Image: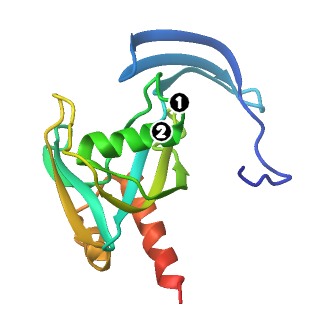
Amino acid sequence: MPRSFPDDPQPWQVLEQTYLFRRPPWLVLRKDHLRLPNGAEIPEYWISEYPPWVNVLAVTKNDELVLIRQYRPALAQVHFELPAGVVDPEDPSLQAAAQRELAEETGYGGGHWSLLATLSANPALQTNLSYTFLAQGVEALAHAQPERTEDLRVHLIPVNQAESLLNEENMIQALHYGPLARYLLARAKQP
């Protein structure tokens, strides 16, 4: 739970909410009419609703990161990413969703799992959170079975080379970059 401070701003009041477009899970757009605590109003504040997202920072028993590379149409580029996806309604938990995504996209699984980071892509405009799990000691269990709409390649990168991925802009997805940087910082502090 985030820490609060005595002088924190107060919540804004929602005067009206109108849904403009609904194509779950990828695009739900609403317009809110908001009133700030000082009385000022914002008659058109646009918010995108998404389900939760999960990412997996998977490390093999040989100290390699299990990463993927895929084309991203919005930037028209290919970069390294963590295995990731949306939480489906039938997933029993966030961790189960993360385990499913890792298995589907890479064929890897097993190991010891823990929550590494909970982040927001844009808390001003998006409703969802992204949960990154650290999976240590994973191993190849099956062949990857990505969805028909995914075209990705699996790469094993030694952890000691991961910093160069970040420094050379080979990973630019902020919700993947941040947890990887956190992990590398924590490892650097270990004796």
Residue 179's image quarter?
bottom left
In the displayed structure image, the side of residue 168 where residue 10 appears, left or right: right
What kind of element bears circle 2? helix
Question: Around disc 2, counting alpha carbons within 10 Å, would you say few (fewer than 14), some (14 to 19), or many (20 or more)?
Answer: some
Q: CA distance from mark 2 to mark 1?
A: 6 Å
Q: Is residue 191 above or below residue 2?
A: below
What kind of element bears circle 1? loop
Horizontal and vertical percent for residue 112?
Answer: 49, 59
- The answer to whether marks 2 and 1 mark residues whose Cβ atoms lie closer than 8 Å is yes
Q: Is residue 97 above or below residue 27?
A: below
- In this view, the residue in front, 135 or 125, is 135
- In this view, the residue in front, 8 or 126, is 126
- In this view, the residue in front, 24 or 138, is 138
In the displayed structure image, the side of residue 48 where residue 143 appears, left or right: left
Q: Residue at x 71, y 52 (%)?
A: 2
Horizontal and vertical percent for residue 53?
Answer: 44, 38
Question: Around disc 1, counting alpha carbons within 10 Å, would you say few (fewer than 14), some (14 to 19), or many (20 or more)?
Answer: few
Q: Is residue 164 above or below residue 74?
A: below
Horizontal and vertical percent for residue 30?
Answer: 49, 17
- The residue singled out by tag 2 in the image is 96
Amino acid type at image mark 1:
Pro
Residue 80's image quarter?
bottom left
Q: Residue at x 17, y 47 (%)?
A: 70
Q: Is residue 48 above or below residue 62?
A: above
Q: Residue at x 44, y 37 (%)?
A: 97
Amino acid type at image mark 2:
Ala
Q: Residue at x 34, y 40 (%)?
A: 101
Q: Is residue 129 visible?
A: no
- The residue singled out by tag 1 in the image is 92
In the displayed structure image, the side of residue 190 where residue 161 appears, left or right: left
